[in-house]
Amino acid sequence: MPRSPLALAALTTAAVPGLDARSVRAEDAVGEYDVAVVTAADGTQWEVRAPQTTMAGAALEAEMELLESLALYQEAGVLPFAVPRIAGSALLPEGGRAVVHKHIVGTPLDIEALHPGPGLAADLGRTLAAVHELPASVVEACGLPSYTAEVYRDRRLVELDEAAATGRVPTALLRRWEAALEDVALWRFRPVVVHGDLAAEQVLVAGGRVAAITGWSDARVADPADDLAWLLVAAPPEAVDSIMEAYQLRRTELQDPRLVDRALLVGELALARWLLHGVRQHLPEIVADAEAMLADLDEATREDDAS
């Protein structure tokens, strides 16, 4: 059962001694977490996050360790954005911990409103490049996954086989994806630190800049295309060049001529993963949604091939 905002407020006061909670509001959360923002008597806002499952609790433990390291890189000016800084934690009756940090002020990214030029689109490119320039040891020391390019390509192939087995992916799309995954040159990349689960709610914007990135529980050493895919698929086409130009200028020794091609492919494969999520969890609404998007993509790619 989801925890009530009042229960989350009680966890906040247990995690941060002396905190005098005066109000609380529930927040939408990505993943299996209960989240609320608590306002203290002095006006300070605190965010509390409690895992709903054992798996989410384990991911949160690794994320807490990672956030400590990321904070050091932010203090050193390597990361140009804020990351949550854990102020305390409270044990949960069923095991695991709820964690509390000061609430980071910002508005979730409106990706459809991005414009070309040196503004927010370029800042997004620089921001992701800064993450991808972090040493792999930052993630590996926390016990988070680390993949070689070959292993990561194999994982994609397994996902594709599983999606094909559902019988719900259009045949032309399967052929398109299989050909791309068999193109070894497309998968020659240097694995880097990636956020792994970027979404609008986790990219907070203030003053026309990226103010913070949250939700680091899926961080890993993997394909940089994972972080770029969402932006390149959803951003207005005229803003994509600004994102990628700023990204490439900020990266050092970037030798990945097929990065954009792979990112666009990863964006397409996300629909297969969405389908698999619905099938595995027996969620017919998600399955229907994924099938509709796959049909739209199949039609769009056929039109592109024809033109």
Image (cartoon, grey):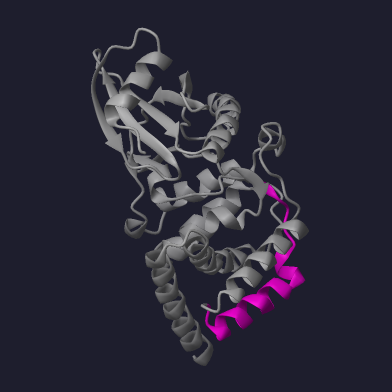
Main SS of the magenta part reads helix
Q: Is residue 87 left or right of residue 190?
A: left
Measured from the top left, where is residue 137 in percent x and y?
72, 35
Q: Nearer the viewer, residue 15 or 267?
A: 15
- Residue 84 horizontal/vertical position (percent): 46, 29
Give the image location of residue 176, x and y in percent.
Answer: 61, 80
Farthest residue in the top direction? 18
Does any portion of residue 118 appear in the rendered image?
no
Find out whether residue 223 is within the magenta segment.
Answer: no
- Residue 206 in view, yes or no: yes
Residue 29 position within the rendered picture, expressed as x and y whole percent measured from the top left: 38, 42
Number of numbered labels in the structure image? 0
Q: Nearer the viewer, residue 11 or 74?
A: 11
Q: Is residue 72 left or right of residue 300?
A: right
As drawn, the residue found furthest toward the bottom would be: 306
Q: Which residues are magenta?
A: 169-192
Task: Give the answer, above or below, for where 223 lies relative to 140.
Answer: below
Residue 264 lies in what quarter of the image?
A: bottom right
Quadrant where the N terminus is found in the figure: top left
* Residue at 42%, 43% in the rendered image: 202
Residue 189 higher or lower than 81, as above or below = below
Residue 177 sits inside the magenta stretch: yes
**Which quadrant holds residue 38?**
top left
Image side of residue 1 versus residue 24, left or right: right
Q: What's the residue at 42%, 16% (across, down)? A: 15
Q: Tell me which residue sits at (57%, 63%) in the image.
A: 263
Residue at 42% in and 62% down = 283
